[in-house]
Image (tube, coloured by chain):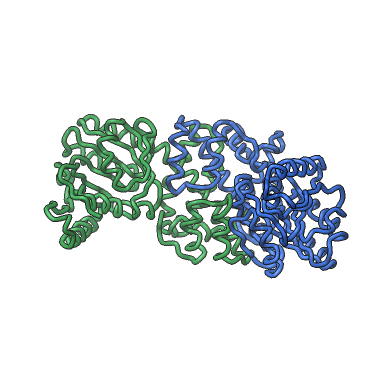
Chain colours: A blue, B green
Amino acid sequence: MSTPNTSGPRVGFIGLGAMGHPMAGHLADRGLLAVVGNRTAAKAANFAAAREASAGRDASAIGQPPIRAAATFADFAACDGVVLCVSADADVLENVDGLATHLSPGAIVIDHSTVSVETAREAAKRLAARGIGFLDAPVSGGVEGAKSGKLSIMVGGDEAILERARPVLEAYGARIALMGGTGAGQATKAVNQILVAGINEAVCEGLAFAEKLGLDAERLLPTLMAGAASNWFLDKRGATMLQGEFRPGFKCAHMAKDLRIVQAMAEAAGIRHPVIDRALADYSELEARGDGELDTSALILIKRDSRHTRFA
Amino acid sequence: MSTPNTSGPRVGFIGLGAMGHPMAGHLADRGLLAVVGNRTAAKAANFAAAREASAGRDASAIGQPPIRAAATFADFAACDGVVLCVSADADVLENVDGLATHLSPGAIVIDHSTVSVETAREAAKRLAARGIGFLDAPVSGGVEGAKSGKLSIMVGGDEAILERARPVLEAYGARIALMGGTGAGQATKAVNQILVAGINEAVCEGLAFAEKLGLDAERLLPTLMAGAASNWFLDKRGATMLQGEFRPGFKCAHMAKDLRIVQAMAEAAGIRHPVIDRALADYSELEARGDGELDTSALILIKRDSRHTRFA
């Protein structure tokens, strides 16, 4: 499925985690990927080596330069754009500072990380000072969406910059929505995370209850999906959580990090936010008991346990 | 789309509300419906008259006896089965008692109401004493599912009785699942309502937040639906709630009634149930402020208001 790239942009990708790895793979499939970087450098070297090995078996990749693993930010200097897919606000700004000193004016940094609106604005400001464009572009759709290349991408920034970045985003986005100026992508992702966290609460509490009632999962899950309870999380995580399988997916620790950002935003916005408060308390509890690296469907583990109900 | 009924069961239907009216319509379309009843008798008379008027224009309905509006339970005496679609536990048992004295042994009562497992067992017991079968068969899929004939039907009871009732359920069910013995349908519906109530909380809190952020609904809703936040309620009620349109749909008062049943069951089951508690408190508040007859999406009205957050 490779499309040789003779004139398209040459892109760098930083952050080869559960989401970033398959997303970078889609860029490589389209011949858009030039350089990869990762905090653990071996991951980048392995990615580059694996692509080199598969390119040797792929006729359409002949003539394309190999993908390089970056050792320093200077290795991204020739890129038209660099994609970030990291975890924390500080990681985004550290990468932005490193890239700002090496990219050429007119280059674009696309950030798929989930961070605060303020971090997005700060990143845009620091890059703009060097003539470099910025899009905050958080995604939803889980590892399934990253692997299938069918993510929902929520973009904040300038429309002209988005149009130049579109060939990159189309490599893994089923829907690309410009939500407003810088920060509007992160604002939209905050809304998305309220829904995701609240739906997880509902599904995990409901399925913990179903277990106690002794209902048969194979009949229950499609029956729930056929009615008004239908949702993405039940469809993708219902069967695995009932089997005690909690490989991420999306980690409890990452959900807790996102909800801390969202809670502060909701408080400032002046809405009632009991869903955020409940979910943040629950994922913090999962982190505290050492389950932060499990998928968010591990929430069912504490729903099953009523001992602390009245003190929660 | 009428299918003439020459040898199928002749069915009665009691409870022509928002769900029951279109469900009875599907039975009539298939030529299965003989008698309709309703607490407000004029509704049954209007239903029968409207079907009579439309049958006059429908060649395939020629030769079918007209649908009669029942004045008393005796009017259901010749039915092979009677379908109930009412609101409260007491209504179900009142109808069961009335039907038990008139239906013939071998007839079946199908109850689509959402009531307690105990009420389902009591109904089955009273009917069994007269040789009459019973299925608890609550549904999910909303008024949309009732109108399109694509409900999810959660059945408790005897498999042989379900097989005899299947032609009736197929008139409006996309999925018909036998979940176990008597009461298992209601147990499954209780799980369903935890998911539905919790998803409503998540969607209404998220959209109230999106309003405060000034995000554009036409871009927001499809973007959320394209990722991991995707769910039935957002799809069916997102746009209308943001327009301040709260026609039911599913009434807040009915959700509160269901959640009172579910809360007691969850407490007895020994799970943590903060989702149920929060939703019941919120729908009770909506009832108390006079909004019990609005659709459950009216929950966004109290999410917008942070004045009581800390006392809620």
Give the vertical position of A48 relative to A175 (above or below).
above
Say which residue appears at 80% left-offset and 58% top-offset.
A79
Q: Position of residue A296 (x, y in %)?
A: 63, 41
Query: In the picture, residue A174 is in which quadrant?
Result: bottom right
Residue B21 visible here? yes
Comparing A271 with B210, the one in front is: B210
Residue B146 versus residue A9 in the image, above or below: above
Q: Quadrant of the C terminus of chain A?
A: top right
Image spot of residue B240 (x, y percent): 47, 63
Image position, residue B138 (x, y; %) = 36, 42
Residue positioned 66% across, 67% down in the render: A180
Q: Is residue A154 above or below residue A301?
A: below
Residue A64 relative to residue B189: left or right: right
Instruction: Using the rendered image of the protein, determine whether residue B307 is visible from the camera's viewpoint.
Output: no
Which quarter of the picture shows residue A185? bottom right
The image quadrant of residue B203 is: bottom right
Using residue B278 as the reference point, say whether residue B67 is left or right of it: left
Q: Relative to residue B158, is residue A174 depicted above or below?
A: below
Closest to the observer: B25 or B258?
A: B25
Identify the residue at horizontal 65%, vertical 43% (top origin). Answer: A250
| Callout count | 0
Viewer-closest of A142 and B261: A142
Position in image of residue B143 (x %, y %): 37, 54
